[in-house]
Amino acid sequence: MEKLHSLSNRITCLSLLFILNLFYPANAEFNSLTRIPFSKGFSPLFGDGNLMRSSDDKSVRLLLSQYTGSGFRSSDLYNHGFFSAKIKLPSEYTAGIVMAFYTTNGDVFEKTHDELDFEFLGNIRGKAWRFQTNVYGNGSTSRGREERYSLWFDPSKEFHRYSILWTTKKIIFYIDEIPIRQIIHNDEMGGDYPSKPMSLYATIWDASDWATSGGKYKVNYKYAPFVAEFTDLVLHGCAVDPLQEIPSPGCSENDDDWPENINYSTLKPRQLVAMKKFRQKYMYYSYCYDTLRYPIPPPECEVDPLERQQFKETGRLKFGKKHHRRHGKRRSQVLNLSKDEERDDI
Ligand SMILES: *[C@@H]1O[C@H](CO)[C@@H](O)[C@H](O)[C@H]1NC(C)=O
Ligand SMILES: *[C@@H]1O[C@H](CO)[C@@H](O)[C@H](O)[C@H]1NC(C)=O
Ligand SMILES: *[C@@H]1O[C@H](CO)[C@@H](O)[C@H](O)[C@H]1NC(C)=O
């Protein structure tokens, strides 16, 4: 007994170390990013009364009250870039709430817009926040490219950094320094690859009709106001006039291939491993495995045959998937949630 006990302790320690290593690869580049004061890079989008700036101009809070949500956007459009913020989400009962952090040009190109999304989908008390990423190119709204995931931490407890890297060659979504999704541009994607200048947006709003378990759980204003906090904002890109695509003064000649030459736009082997680990543990829906919707996976999908077996034809994780005991609880939460949701909200 005693021996078994210490052995299992050792295994727990080892696997903890292993996980820490994967999830926190040393990567100093993110620390060197230039933060931009709110008023220098952004302006309110809607619900101005629910947008609260800090006195040092470094942070901003977005509130959802029973009267309105709120949002802000970058004042400029950028032709490619690295967009990032540290964000803390509302806690307690957050069903029906969507907090979105995304780039789009929908207000300039109504019919042919591009978009890259992080969307956090609220949850009932005691259940973990879930989120999705999505990508649209040139108005391809009929071809959603959603993936859904749970998180390895509680995003309402402290700030975490959420980042979107967008270059001519690839798109990477990061949480802290972990890449969680990468889309490599290939010619077959055609207009589905975002290619026109976009602004960065952050919004919080009432999406009672679909956000949590397909609309089963609505926003409960007894817990309002719901507060999302943003700090350490990063807008790293070349600001352009969206229609003329003329770089603003300050963009150098060879900004064309910016930011390909920046370290964090090329994933190191260790980061690729961390990304795979994340996806194995926390992804519970992928359009790439949703063969009911896409009998032939879209061209950017890298279908991993082993991973494929873990998903049903709806793109949802199969029930009863074998998993590491340490993660049993989290996984069963995910499974229960997906059972509730089915596919009506995708
Ligand atoms: C985007 O869509 C418009 C309208 O459908 C089309 O004319 C244009 O060629 C498309 N752009 C790309 C890059 O596919
Ligand atoms: C990339 O990282 C290396 C070492 O970590 C550094 O020497 C180099 O200057 C960085 N390159 C860029 C473009 O930031
Ligand atoms: C998930 O569902 C099972 C059976 O329906 C139940 O026993 C379990 O407690 C649920 N887990 C969570 C985390 O809600």
Image (cartoon, rainbow, N blue to C red):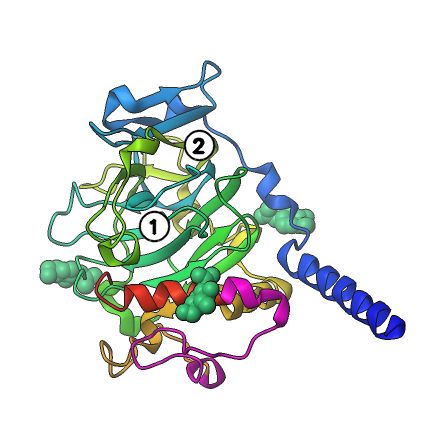
Q: Which residue is under mark 2?
A: 230
Residue that appears at 25% across and 50% down? 196
Q: Is residue 333 visible?
A: no
- The front one of 263 and 114 is 114
| Position of residue 290 measured from the top left corner of the image (x, y, whole percent) | 30, 76
User: Which stretch is magenta?
Assistant: 305-331
Q: Secondary structure at mark 2?
A: strand
- The front one of 93 and 307 is 93
CA separation, marks 2 and 1? 17 Å
- The quadrant of the picture occupied by the C terminus is bottom left
| Position of residue 296 measured from the top left corner of the image (x, y, whole percent) | 27, 83
Residue that appears at 62% across and 67% down? 269
Residue that appears at 12% across and 47% down? 110
Vertical comparison of 83 with 269: above or below:
above
Residue that appears at 88% across and 71% down? 2
Question: Disc 2 residue type?
Answer: Phe
Q: Which residue is under mark 1?
A: 121
Question: Disc 1 residue type?
Answer: Leu
Q: Is residue 235 visible?
A: yes
Vertical comparison of 338 with 288: above or below:
above
